[in-house]
Image: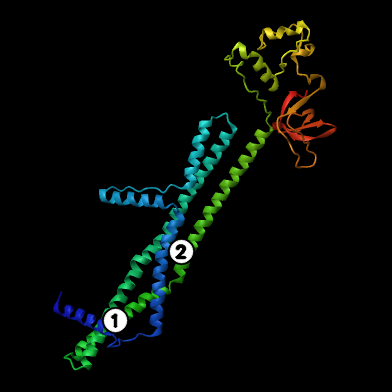
Amino acid sequence: MAFAGLKKQINKANQYVTEKMGAAEGTKLDEDFCEMEKRTDITYELVEELQLKTKEFLQPNPNARAKMAAVKSISKLSGQAKAATYPQPEGVLGEAMVTFGRKLGDDNQFAEALIEMGESMKQIADVKYSLDDNVKQNFLEPLHHLQSKDLKEVMHHRKKLHGRRLDYDCKKRKQHKGSSVSEDEIRQAEEKFAESLHLAQMGMHNILDNDVEQITQLTSFAESLLEYHTQCTQILQDLTQTLHDKRNEVANRPKSEFVPKTLADLHITSELSSSHNLHIDGQNGRNVSSPVNPSAPPANNNIWDDPFGSSKPNSSPAASPSINSPHASKGPSCVALYDFSPENPGELGFKEGDTIKLVSRIDHNWLEGSIDGRTGYFPFTYVQIIVPLP
């Protein structure tokens, strides 16, 4: 550092300490300049905070952001241009739906619906990536340029202004005290002070009087959001319509009744448990009688020679009361598996074990029946069909 430069630094330090100790008062700038400084400081904080919060808005997962930053740093150190992609939550969810939908199989209606929704979620993720690109290009990059160029330059001029003001005040104070400070030194210090003041004011004015460009950037941000939500709305509307159609298709499809298999069906039962299995089959509506009454005619006892029904009597089932449900003569009926309490007008309430006469089938979920002189609707899943409707 040259001697003149060193002397200037000493003068600035001298004046700064003197002002802090209250022994001297520095040159005061007007209120307009102080107001510009205040607004510039707020703008600087605003730009920094807007960049941070916008990135958090676009990429809300802090762990993913930290991982991406680490990958970027490692790539720079290794000299490889490797950019990590932020995992959009819609894409992650959509991929899981598609994966498990395919695992369920092509013949599963729920699997098809799951794949449809998963693909739609992945489309939303792609739209979100487009939003990220648009916001970064039209909003974040101008903010970064403002912070790294214009605001940085203004802060440099303000810092230089502060140093030249201290140098100017120090030389004036020394001159008043009779020190050997020439008028030429005072004039040069004043000229530099005036130059820095002009540059600082112009820089702050250009930043603060830039409303048109800044509003344009906000408009671009809003337009990007509007486009994103519009595309998402269209994707979700198409998905909703597809799912409605698929649901109606499944609801109108005839539903086959499921009869769980017994150990006898799987050929893994023993002769000792034959009578017990027959009793269970009767409860499951397999049209097999309970243990035969010892007083029944011997001609009907031959069913116990083949407890699993492999040997059939010569007569038809309708002519063999011993192998038909005792409710067959009463017409279509069912037995309540659980208590059902009606919640709406027209529903039929009953208790577990009640026998209900079937009147009609409303749809694949509801039946109409009567019990104790009462008629109403009840859910299919609450009963076990004994004699089906014709």
Mark 1 nearby-residue class (10 Å; few <14, some 14–19, many ≥20): some
Q: Nearer the viewer, residue 118 or 134?
A: 118
- Residue type of the residue flagged with mark 2: Gln
Q: CA distance from mark 1 to mark 2?
A: 32 Å
Q: Is the residue 190 above or below the residue 154 in the image?
A: below
Q: Is the residue 322 above or below the residue 163 in the image?
A: above
- Residue type of the residue flagged with mark 1: Glu
In the picture, the disc for residue 217 is: 2
Percent of width and height locating residue 305: 68, 7
Q: Residue at x 43, y 72 (%)?
A: 210
Residue marked by disc 1: 195
N-terminal label among 1 and 2: 1
Q: Is residue 20 visible?
A: yes
**Image-based side of 90 in relation to 267, left or right:** left
Q: Say which quarter of the image contains residue 251.
A: top right
Q: Nearer the viewer, residue 228 or 115?
A: 115
**Image-based side of 21 in relation to 225, left or right:** left
Farthest residue toward the front? Answer: 294
Q: Nearer the viewer, residue 382 or 132?
A: 382
Q: Is the residue 327 above or below the residue 6 in the image?
A: above
Q: Say which quarter of the image contains residue 350.
A: top right
Percent of width and height locating residue 314: 74, 6
